Amino acid sequence: MAEMATAANPCMLRPPAANTGHGLPAGGLARYVCPWKRTGTGTEWSKSRRQHRRFPLPAGFLTINFFKIMGSFRKGIQGGFSGKVGNVVGAHWRGIDYMRSLPRVSKGRVVTEDQLVHRVRFACAVNFAKPISFVFNAGYGKLAKQNLSGYNLAVRQIFKQAIVGEYPDFEVDPALVRISEGDLVRPRNPMVEVLSGQLLRFTWADHTRRGIKADHSDRAIVVVYNPAKAEYQYDTQGAERLDEELLLELPDYFAGDEVHVYLGMVSKTGGNACNSLYLGTVTVDGGEASAPEPEEEDEP
């Protein structure tokens, strides 16, 4: 039989009813009473969680935090789970197992105008970023955290800095989008030129030297956005900083369209990147555009 609480041991174990409902014999389970919820006088009572931890739980007990709507848990003897069990939903994301309760059903709730504006702006940012989420995960790698991917950070940047217009006619200004962020030094004299056969030629100057955050092995990232077709073309592995050139072939049906062009640099290990450069627009049948020199603050 479970030991009853005393002044020397305020942790009380209460035996359950004979029929536990869990297929276990009577007396096999017990409820744990937290002493910091008790009231009393004298120095014998444990009144804080720190003191409470001094009293060990009986073997086989599971502690549950009732103060969180969502919680994470380590792998137990049964491992994690996904899906719905009763009113609990289990999921696995970025190496973390989560449990959360089902959302409450809101009946008759009126959505405010500010909420509608936020939803439309957020959807606009997601629609722009999702097709090239792979590029953003590479370009924002250093800033990514366990609970935020590079794509999540890019959506946040677009949402905060690149949405223009008035509700409900929001749109993304491509000139304000960054395909990468970090503290690597940006390449100098970046340019893009349209060659015959829908071929884009990117060039830049490699000014890597001792004392600056740049390396000859940094990889170039280029992105071409065609708003008329709502399509992207990109290359994240085609050239290194030392090469000072990258060729990108576009589809034939891009001919005659105006496209937006970006250039960035990512370290060989993927642990850092530079703030990307927006190279302007070119028409895919000739023409060229250039970006301004990197700011002086990029230098050491």
Image: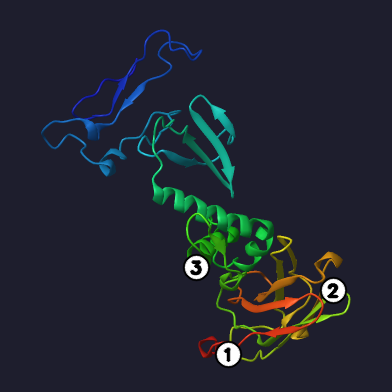
**Quick check: 236 left or right of 183?**
right
**Badge 2: residue crowd in 10 Å (few <14, some 14–19, many ≥20):** many
The N terminus, quarter of image: top left
Residue on which the image places disc 3: 161
First-in-chain label (3 vs 2): 3
Residue on which the image places disc 1: 211
- What amino acid type is highlighted by mark number 2? Gln
**Quick check: 58 left or right of 251?**
left
Q: Quadrant of residue 46?
A: top left
Residue on which the image places disc 2: 198
Q: Residue at x 58, y 87 (%)?
A: 294
Give how far apart the Cα atoms at labels 1 and 3 are: 32 Å
Give how far apart the Cα atoms at labels 3 and 2 are: 31 Å
- What amino acid type is highlighted by mark number 3? Gln
Q: Is residue 96 above or below residue 101?
A: below
Q: Residue at x 43, y 8 (%)?
A: 19
Q: Quadrant of residue 45?
A: top left
